[in-house]
Image (tube, grey):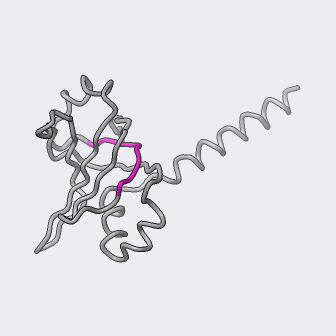
Amino acid sequence: MKKILAYTLLFFSLNICVLHSNVITAENFAKEYIENRKVADSKFLNKKVDIIGTVNKVGKTILFQTYIEINAYKDDYDEFFIYAYPISHYNKKIKKLKKGTKIRIIGKCEGKSFSGNFKIVNCRVYTHKK
């Protein structure tokens, strides 16, 4: 019985490691789009993404939809952001976010816009500890 329990725990711990292996930083996410949009779209567009990044600001659209602007990529000429639109029951948590806070978002990628920024919708938002 102890062996079965040990194997079960090992199996679940390995699955948890696999789940976390799909996490990508905001910078690497943006770089993949900058390097090859077609490949990045095939990898991310209309799929669930798990991104870690730093909050630049929290705001509302003209239709009063809350969003989080996450720093994605910056060089000498351009600056790109990820715009994360959270599920509404996260709004209380989001109001407490400050610039520079590290967060993790899990949501659906809607790709790169004409402005060069990225849109992630239906996000779950977590404060990232690392």
Rendered location of residue 96, percent (x, y)? 19, 27
The dominant secondary structure in magenta is strand
Q: Residue furthest bottom?
A: 35
Q: Which residue shows up at 24% across the image and 49% down it?
A: 83
Which region shows up in magenta? 102-110
In the visual, does 95 lie left or right of 46? left
Q: Which residue shows up at 41% across the image and 68% down it?
A: 40
Pick whichever, 6 or 55, lies toward us: 55
Q: Residue furthest front?
A: 63
Pick whichever, 107 or 18, lies toward us: 107
- Figure quadrant of residue 98: top left
In the visual, does 9 lie left or right of 118? right
Rendered location of residue 36, percent (x, y)? 37, 76
Q: Which residue shows up at 33% across the image and 49% down it?
A: 120
Rendered location of residue 14, percent (x, y)? 66, 45
Asked if residue 103 is among those painted magenta in the image, a careful observer would answer yes
In the visual, does 4 lie left or right of 44? right
Quadrant assignment for the C terminus: top left
Rendered location of residue 35, percent (x, y)? 34, 76
